[in-house]
Image (cartoon, coloured by chain):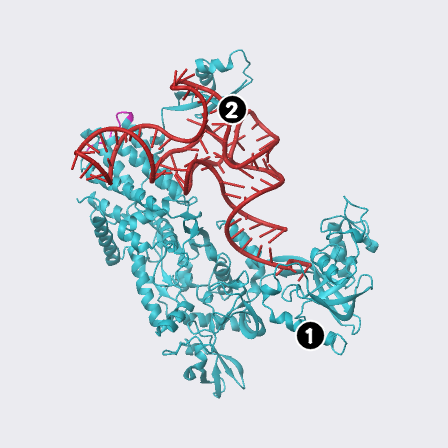
RNA sequence: GGGCAAGUGGUGGAAUGGCAUACACGCAGGACUUAAAAUCCUGUGACCGUAAGGUCGUGUGGGUUCGAUUCCCACCUUGCCCACCA
C-alpha cells in the first residue's frame, strides 16, 4: 500500500468514481421493501463552473444521502440543471454563439466537476429544464392553469429592468432593484401574463404551520411576504357626484379623527373627479410626474410628503363631515384600495403630510400619560393606545375595544366592512427574452388569445435565432415562429413571443425527478406517489421566498388537478450558510474566490468535503481557511496510516481484559451513538467529525501497546471508523474498506454500525463538589452512588472540610453521576 | 419603523440549567534530522503567585436558581428579511 499522497488520492478518487458510474451504485428504483428517502438539493444554474457554495450545499446533502443509504433506506438522490435564463443569452451576444450550444457545453463541464466531488447521484435521472421533453410540461401546466382561470393576461404597471430589458415578478425585485443585475427597477405599463398565486394565499399561509421541520426564519419570511392583515374598508361618498370612495384602514378606531382623504396617483376615480374643475391641469401634471418616477425614487426615504389637493370633498359616513380629497405619492395603488383616510394626530405619515400642506387635525385618542395635551402642542402623531375622545357615542372606550365596536357598527349600518388584505400579488411570468419556455398562446384577430392544442406541444424554441441584445425579444424577429395559423379558425394569426420566467421551470422539477423519462405525461403518478414528498431539501436562504413559495403553489395546484395526494412538497428544509473569505462573500468582483477545482487538485475531494463539514455547522456562515484544509488532510492521513500499519487480518475472540480494552470499546460504541444521533438531529457534522477525531486519538494510543492478542479489538475499532467516516469522505473509505477484505462490496451499501448500550457504561464516574456554586473538589465514585454514600465521601474530604468548617450545611443537592452542591 | 437570527480564547467552533473553552487551527517549547520539511510529544483564556493555589472570565446591566454561556427582562452591536403596507 502506498503512502498517503496527492498522487495516491487522485488515483483512488478516480478509481472509485469510475466504479460508482460503471456499476450504477446510486441508481434508485421505486418499490422495494426498504423505506424510501428522497434527498434533494436545489439544482444549479449550469454556469459551467461549480463554486464553494455549491460544494457546501451538495456535500451536506451527500452526507445525508449516504448516511440514509447505509441505514437501509431506499434513497433517491438526483441532480439536474436549471438551464434556461439570461446568462446563456448574454454569452450568446458576447461570443456570437447559440444559447443552446453554450448551455449544453456548460452542463457537460458542470457534470464533470460534480462527479469529481464524488456525490452519490443517480445520473440516469439527470434533467435539464431547457430540454423540449422538459419544457413542454411547463407549457402543459400553463395551459391547465389557463383552463382553470389561474393564468390570465392583464395590462398594468409592471416592474421593468432596463438592463435585462424584461419584466420582473415582485419576488424578483430586491430592494427596488433587479435580483440578478441589481439595476434599479422602473415601472412600465404593459400587458402581461400572470399566475393567480393569490388564489392560494390563505392555504399558502395556513400550511406553513405544517412545516415544522423548516427553519423558523424561512417560515417567518414567507408569512411576512404573504402578509395577511385584517382591516376595515370604509365607504366615503364624493360630495359632487355621490360616488362611492372606499378607503382601507387598520385603525377604524380613529375614524372620527379623519380630516382628509388621500388617493394614490393611479386611483381610477381620479380623472373623473378632477375633470372640468380648475384643478384638473395641475393634478394631472402631478400624476404624470409620479408615474415617471421609479418606485424607489418615489418612495425614497426622506420625510417630505408630496401631494396636491383635488378640489373635491368626501363625506365621512360616521358624522357627515365634508373633508378635502388629496392625492399623494406615498399612497400605493396596489395595497388596500389605493385610498386612505388621513388621521394626522394618530399616524405619523399623515401628521407630516398635514404639516407640509397645512391641513387640520383632531385628537380622538387620549394619551393616558399626557391627558391635557391639545392638538396644537403635538410634536408627532400619538400612535399608542388610549381612551377615545371626540368620537360621539364611542367616547370613553379603550381604542382596542373601539376597533371592534366601530367596525361592527359600520358593518351593521352599511358604512363599511371588515376585510382581509394580502400583501401577496399575482405572479407576473412573461419575460421578453429568448432563452426560456415559449408561452403556448396564439393571438388570432378573430378568436383572440387561443391556447396551443395539447397535441401541438411543445412549442419549440426556434434555432438559429440572431441574438443581438437590441430591439426587444429576439423571437419577435423570427417570422417563421411568429406567423402561424389560428388553431381554431385557421386564419393568419401571431404567436406569443414572450417566454416564461425561469422560476416556472424550477417550481416542479422535484416531481419530474421521480420519473424523468415519462414521455406521454408530466410524470408517472405511481412513481411520484412513492417518492414524494421530498424528505430532505437543502439549499440557499436566498430562495426562502421566490422558489420555495412558487413550488408550494405549484404543488397545491397539481394536487387540485388530482395529480398529487399531498399538500406540501418539502418535508424538511435545511438552508446552508454562505461561504466567506476574509469576512466577505466570495465573488468575482471582490476577487476573493477560491476555486473548488484547484483545491481538489491539491488536496482531493475528500479533504475538501471534510474541511467544509468540519469548519462550521451547516446553517452558519463558513469562513474559508487554507490551514483548515491542512488540518483535514492531516486527519485523513492518520486514518490512512492507521489502517495501513495497524490493520492485520486475524481471527480470535474480542475479549475485554483490562481498562484500556474497555476504554477503546467504550469510545468506539460512543462514537457510533453520537454520530448516529448527530447527523439526523440538527445536521451536526462538525461535532460528528470531532468525535471521529477523538476515536482516532484513542485508537492510536491503544495501538502503542503492541500486544498482538488485542488485534481483534483494534481491527474492530478501525473498521468502525471507516464505516462512520464513509458518508463524509467516501473515496478514502471505499479504498480502505476494500483493503479490509470487502472486495466488490461498496462501503456505500455496507451496514451502518450499531452500538451496544452496555459497552457505554462505566464502573466509576467523576463527581464534582460545589460549595455555594463554586467547584471545590472532584471525586471518583462508583456509578449510581447513593446520596448517603456521596455525603460520606464528600463531607470527609479535607479540602471540602476546610470550606465548610464552622458553618451549617443548609442544603445538600445531588445530581446523580454528575455533581453535589453544598449550600452553607 | 416591524420581524428573525447571532454575539464564547489569538482563530473556526463545543457545551441548551450542573467542571466554560470539547475537537481542530495557530503559536511556543522539546524529540528525530547535518539542516529543513514531515511526523511525534508537551504546553497554550486573563490576572496575581517560585509553587500550592487564588481571583476574574461566554456583548452590557438586572432578575430567577443551590448553580446561568444556556431561562426571563431591558439595553448595545452585527447580519438577514420586510418596509411611506394606511
Which percent across, then down, holds residue A48? 34, 63
Residue range (magenta): A652-659
Q: Colour of chain B?
A: red
**Furthest residue to the bottom?**
A491
- Residue sitting at x 32%, y 46%: A629
Q: Is label 1 in a helix, a strand or a loop? A: helix
* Left or right placement of residue A353 versus residue B75 in this view: right
Q: CA distance from mark 1 to mark 2?
A: 76 Å
In primary-sequence order, the first of circles 1 and 2 is 1
Which percent across, then down, holds residue A76? 36, 56
Query: Relative to A301, is B21 above or below?
Result: above
Residue A572 in sight from this viewpoint: yes
Q: Is residue A655 magenta?
A: yes
Instruction: Count neighbours of disc 1 (C-alpha within 10 A) and say few if under 14, some if 14 to 19, many if 20 or more.
Output: some
Which quarter of the image is occupied by the C terminus of chain A?
A: top right
**Furthest residue to the top?**
A806
Say if mark 1 contacts mark 2, CB within 8 Å.
Answer: no
The disc at residue A773 is: 2
Q: Is label 2 in a helix, a strand or a loop? A: loop
- Residue sitting at x 79%, y 51%: A377
Which chain has been coloured cyan in this picture? A
Which percent across, then down, holds residue A223? 56, 55
The residue at which mark 1 appears reads as A284
Amino acid at each position: 500500500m502506498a503512502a498517503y499522497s496527492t498522487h495516491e488520492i487522485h488515483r483512488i478518487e478516480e478509481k472509485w468514481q469510475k466504479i460508482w458510474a460503471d456499476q450504477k451504485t446510486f441508481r434508485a428504483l421505486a418499490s422495494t421493501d426498504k423505506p424510501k428517502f428522497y434527498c434533494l438539493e436545489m439544482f444549479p444554474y449550469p454556469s459551467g463552473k461549480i463554486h464553494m457554495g455549491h460544494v457546501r450545499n451538495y456535500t451536506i446533502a451527500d452526507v445525508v444521502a449516504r448516511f440514509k443509504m447505509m441505514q437501509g433506506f431506499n434513497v433517491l438522490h438526483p441532480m439536474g440543471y436549471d438551464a434556461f435564463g439570461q446568462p446563456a443569452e448574454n454569452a450568446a451576444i458576447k461570443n456570437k454563439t447559440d444559447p443552446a450550444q453554450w448551455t449544453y457545453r456548460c452542463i457537460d463541464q458542470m457534470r464533470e466537476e460534480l462527479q469529481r466531488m464524488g456525490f452519490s447521484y443517480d445520473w440516469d435521472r439527470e434533467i435539464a429544464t431547457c430540454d423540449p421533453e422538459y419544457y413542454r410540461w411547463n407549457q402543459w401546466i400553463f395551459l391547465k392553469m389557463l383552463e382553470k382561470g389561474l393564468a390570465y393576461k392583464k395590462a398594468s404597471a409592471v416592474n421593468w429592468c432596463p438592463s435585462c430589458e424584461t419584466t420582473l415578478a415582485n419576488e424578483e425585485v430586491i430592494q427596488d432593484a433587479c435580483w440578478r443585475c441589481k439595476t434599479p427597477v422602473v415601472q412600465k405599463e404593459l400587458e402581461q401574463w400572470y399566475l393567480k398565486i393569490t388564489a392560494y394565499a390563505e392555504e399558502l399561509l395556513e400550511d406553513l404551520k405544517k412545516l415544522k421541520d423548516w427553519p423558523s426564519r424561512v417560515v417567518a419570511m414567507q408569512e411576512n411576504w404573504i402578509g395577511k392583515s385584517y382591516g376595515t374598508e370604509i365607504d366615503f361618498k364624493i360630495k359632487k357626484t355621490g360616488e362611492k370612495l372606499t378607503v382601507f384602514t387598520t385603525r377604524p378606531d380613529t375614524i372620527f379623527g379623519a380630516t382628509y382623504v388621500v388617493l394614490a396617483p393611479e386611483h381610477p376615480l381620479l380623472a373623473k373627479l378632477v375633470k372640468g374643475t380648475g384643478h384638473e391641469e395641475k393634478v394631472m401634471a402631478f400624476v404624470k410626474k409620479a408615474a415617471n418616477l421609479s418606485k424607489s425614487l418615489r418612495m425614497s426615504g426622506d420625510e417630505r410628503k408630496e401631494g396636491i389637493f383635488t378640489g373635491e370633498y368626501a363625506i365621512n359616513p360616521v358624522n357627515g363631515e365634508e373633508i378635502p380629497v388629496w392625492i399623494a405619492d406615498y399612497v400605493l395603488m396596489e395595497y388596500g384600495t389605493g385610498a386612505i383616510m388621513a388621521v394626522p394626530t394618530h399616524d405619523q405619515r399623515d401628521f407630516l403630510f398635514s404639516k407640509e400642506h397645512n391641513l387640520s387635525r383632531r385628537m380622538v385618542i387620549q394619551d393616558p400619560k399626557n391627558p391635557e395635551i391639545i392638538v396644537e402642542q403635538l410634536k408627532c402623531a400619538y400612535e399608542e393606545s388610549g381612551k377615545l375622545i371626540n368620537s360621539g357615542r364611542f367616547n370613553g372606550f379603550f381604542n382596542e375595544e373601539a376597533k371592534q365596536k366601530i367596525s361592527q357598527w359600520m358593518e351593521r349600518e352599511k358604512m363599511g366592512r371588515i376585510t382581509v388584505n394580502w400583501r401577496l400579488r399575482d405572479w407576473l411570468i412573461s419575460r421578453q427574452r429568448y432563452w426560456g419556455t415559449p408561452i403556448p398562446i396564439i393571438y388570432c384577430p378573430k378568436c383572440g388569445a387561443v391556447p396551443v392544442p395539447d397535441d401541438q406541444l411543445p412549442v419549440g424554441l426556434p434555432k438559429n435565432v440572431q441574438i443581438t441584445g437590441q430591439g426587444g425579444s429576439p423571437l419577435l424577429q423570427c417570422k417563421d415562429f411568429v406567423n402561424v395559423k389560428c388553431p381554431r379558425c385557421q386564419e393568419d394569426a401571431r404567436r406569443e413571443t414572450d417566454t416564461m420566467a425561469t422560476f416556472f421551470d424550477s417550481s416542479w422539477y422535484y416531481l419530474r425527478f421521480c420519473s424523468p423519462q415519462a414521455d406521454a405525461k408530466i410524470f408517472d403518478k405511481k412513481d411520484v406517489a412513492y417518492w414524494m414528498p421530498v424528505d430532505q431539501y437543502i439549499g440557499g436562504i436566498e430562495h426562502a421566498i421566490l422558489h420555495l413559495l412558487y413550488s408550494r403553489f405549484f404543488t397545491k395546484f397539481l394536487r387540485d388537478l388530482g395529480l398529487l395526494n399531498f399538500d406540501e412538497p418539502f418535508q424538511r428544509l435545511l438552508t446552508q450558510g454562505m461561504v466567506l473569505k476574509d469576512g466577505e462573500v466570495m465573488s468575482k468582483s471582490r476577487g476573493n474566490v477560491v476555486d473548488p477545482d484547484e483545491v481538489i487538485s491539491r488536496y482531493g475531494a475528500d479533504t475538501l468535503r471534510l474541511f467544509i463539514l468540519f469548519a462550521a455547522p451547516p446553517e452558519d456562515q463558513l469562513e474559508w481557511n487554507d490551514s483548515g484544509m491542512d488540518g483535514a488532510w492531516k486527519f485523513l492521513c492518520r486514518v490512512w496510516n492507521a489502517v495501513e500499519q495497524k490493520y492485520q487480518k486475524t481471527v480470535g475472540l474480542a475479549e475485554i481484559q483490562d481498562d484500556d480494552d474497555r476504554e477503546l470499546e467504550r469510545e468506539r460504541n460512543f462514537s457510533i451513538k453520537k454520530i448516529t444521533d448527530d447527523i439526523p438531529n440538527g445536521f451536526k457534522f462538525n461535532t460528528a467529525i470531532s468525535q471521529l477525531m477523538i476515536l482516532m486519538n484513542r485508537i492510536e494510543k491503544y495501538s502503542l501497546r503492541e500486544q498482538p492478542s488485542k488485534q481483534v479489538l483494534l481491527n474492530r475499532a478501525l473498521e468502525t471508523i471507516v464505516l462512520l467516516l464513509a458518508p463524509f469522505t467516501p473515496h478514502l473509505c471505499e479504498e480502505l474498506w476494500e483493503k479490509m477484505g470487502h472486495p466488490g462490496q461498496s462501503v456505500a451499501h455496507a451496514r451502518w454500525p450499531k452500538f451496544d448500550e452496555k459497552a457505554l457504561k462505566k464502573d466509576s464516574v467523576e463527581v464534582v463538589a460545589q460549595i455555594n456554586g463554586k467547584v471545590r473538589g472532584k471525586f471518583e465514585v462508583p456509578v449510581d452512588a447513593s446520596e448517603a454514600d456521596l455525603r460520606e465521601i464528600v463531607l470527609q474530604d479535607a479540602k471540602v472540610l476546610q470550606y465548610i468548617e464552622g458553618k451549617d450545611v443548609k442544603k445538600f443537592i445531588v445530581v446523580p453521576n454528575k455533581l453535589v452542591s453544598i449550600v452553607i
